[in-house]
């Protein structure tokens, strides 16, 4: 799957992943009104609004981007109905030939980690039949329980030719409370990055590993260090746009071949119509605003890489 991701990045010229992280207050009133008219102001109604919102955005941008990243918590808040909307979103995106990165941040050990891996990336045995559960192409994984939590995911990835993005240096302001702590004189995130590189050697594609890393755009200097530590790991870079990251902050995340990173934007794209810059589109044309935001983000990244 890493080869497909690279191929689609090269085809689109846009190393962008759109975070499908819907909140009800992002969703225009006319979509909510229609969903509530059919299902009432219920969890089912909320999930229907989320699904219709996602579908419209995907229809507007799928030809511009290689991948999407639905964050499962935004669906789980609506219970079982929300999880159904998550699955419908995953399936629809795959029908559009998009690579789907399940932002699930799983981290556990033993049989529990194995079950998470099977549920999100693999196949589960039911009697004489096997079924793919959520069936994403990549999943995000929290490594802080150690190899016991990561190895089951790696095993499923080898079986299914799928991939991982392992949290190394996250984009949130308080990430340094633990990730920047010095151990033997070095920050913890560097040690995690070295372990990700070792794990990656066990799951190599043609030029990049199936085991990637998450490193926030809000920490460009750390990104520069981690790029050298993990030369064969694809880096998923959150924090662009709404969290403050800009194209000029991203150049160190990429290798000299122009590959090696994919940049996430969530509300900066899916709720673009709420920004002054894209206000002319209005709520009725929210998906067109999202397309314009993707085009602008792609141009920003392209210019930054050309000028580095």
Image: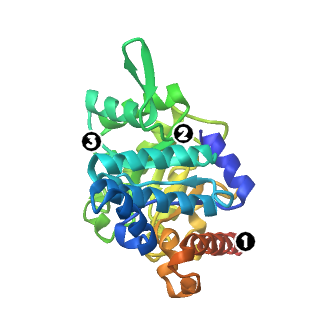
Tell me the residue that label 2 is attached to.
210
Is 189 on the left-hand or right-hand side of 304? left
> How many neighbours does mark 1 have within 10 angstroms: few (below 14), some (14-19), or many (20 or more)?
few
Q: CA distance from mark 1 to mark 2?
A: 27 Å
Vertical side of 92 occupied by 1: above or below:
above
> Considering the numbered disc 1 on the image, is that residue within a helix, a strand or a loop?
helix
**Mark 2 vs 3, N-terminal side:** 3
Vertical side of 160 occupied by 296: above or below:
below
> Considering the numbered disc 3 on the image, is that residue within a helix, a strand or a loop?
loop
Determine contact: label 2, label 3, CB under 8 Å.
no
Residue 204 visible? The answer is yes
> At 56% across and 83% down in the image, what residue appears?
278
Residue 145 image label: 3
Q: Which of the image's four quarters has the N terminus?
A: top right
**Mark 1 vs 2, N-terminal side:** 2
Residue 306 image label: 1
Q: CA distance from mark 2 to mark 3?
A: 20 Å
Question: Where does the image place residue 46, in percent across and percent down from the top left?
Answer: 34, 60
Is 5 on the left-hand or right-hand side of 279? right
**Mark 1 vs 3, N-terminal side:** 3
Q: Which of the image's four quarters has the C terminus?
A: bottom right
Q: CA distance from mark 1 to mark 3?
A: 39 Å
Vertical side of 185 occupied by 126: above or below:
above
Is 178 on the left-hand or right-hand side of 12? left
Question: Where does the image place residue 148, in percent across and percent down from the top left?
Answer: 30, 33
Residue 246 visible? The answer is no
Determine contact: label 1, label 3, CB under 8 Å.
no
Is 14 on the left-hand or right-hand side of 243? right
Of residue 164 and residue 269, the one placed in the foreground of this image is 269
């Amino acid at each position: 799957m890493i080869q497909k991701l690279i191929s689609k990045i090269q085809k689109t010229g846009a190393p962008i992943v759109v975070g499908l992280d819907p909140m009800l207050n992002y969703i225009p009133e006319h979509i909510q009104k229609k969903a509530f008219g059919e299902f009432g102001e219920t969890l089912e109604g909320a999930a229907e609004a989320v699904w219709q919102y996602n579908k419209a955005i995907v229809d507007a941008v799928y030809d511009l981007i290689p991948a999407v990243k639905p964050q499962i918590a935004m669906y789980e808040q609506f219970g079982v109905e929300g999880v159904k909307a998550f699955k419908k979103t995953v399936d629809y995106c795959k029908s559009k030939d998009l690579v789907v990165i399940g932002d699930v941040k799983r981290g556990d050990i033993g049989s529990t980690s194995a079950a998470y891996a099977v549920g999100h990336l693999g196949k589960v045995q039911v009697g004489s039949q096997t079924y793919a559960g959520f069936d994403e192409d990549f999943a995000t994984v929290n490594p802080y329980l150690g190899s016991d939590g990561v190895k089951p995911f790696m095993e499923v990835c080898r079986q299914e030719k799928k991939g991982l993005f392992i949290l190394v240096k996250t984009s949130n302001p308080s990430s340094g409370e633990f990730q920047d702590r010095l151990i033997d004189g070095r920050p913890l995130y560097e040690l995690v990055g070295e372990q990700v590189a070792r794990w990656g050697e066990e799951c190599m594609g043609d030029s990049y590993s199936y085991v990637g890393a998450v490193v926030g755009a809000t920490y460009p200097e750390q990104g520069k260090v981690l790029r050298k530590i993990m030369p064969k790991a694809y880096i998923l870079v959150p924090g662009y746009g709404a969290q403050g990251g800009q194209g000029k902050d991203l150049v160190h995340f990429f290798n000299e071949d122009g590959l090696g990173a994919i940049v996430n934007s969530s509300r900066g794209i899916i709720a673009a119509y709420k920004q002054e810059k894209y206000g002319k589109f209005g709520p009725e044309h929210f998906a067109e605003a999202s397309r314009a935001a993707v085009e602008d983000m792609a141009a920003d990244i392209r210019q930054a890489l050309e000028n580095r």
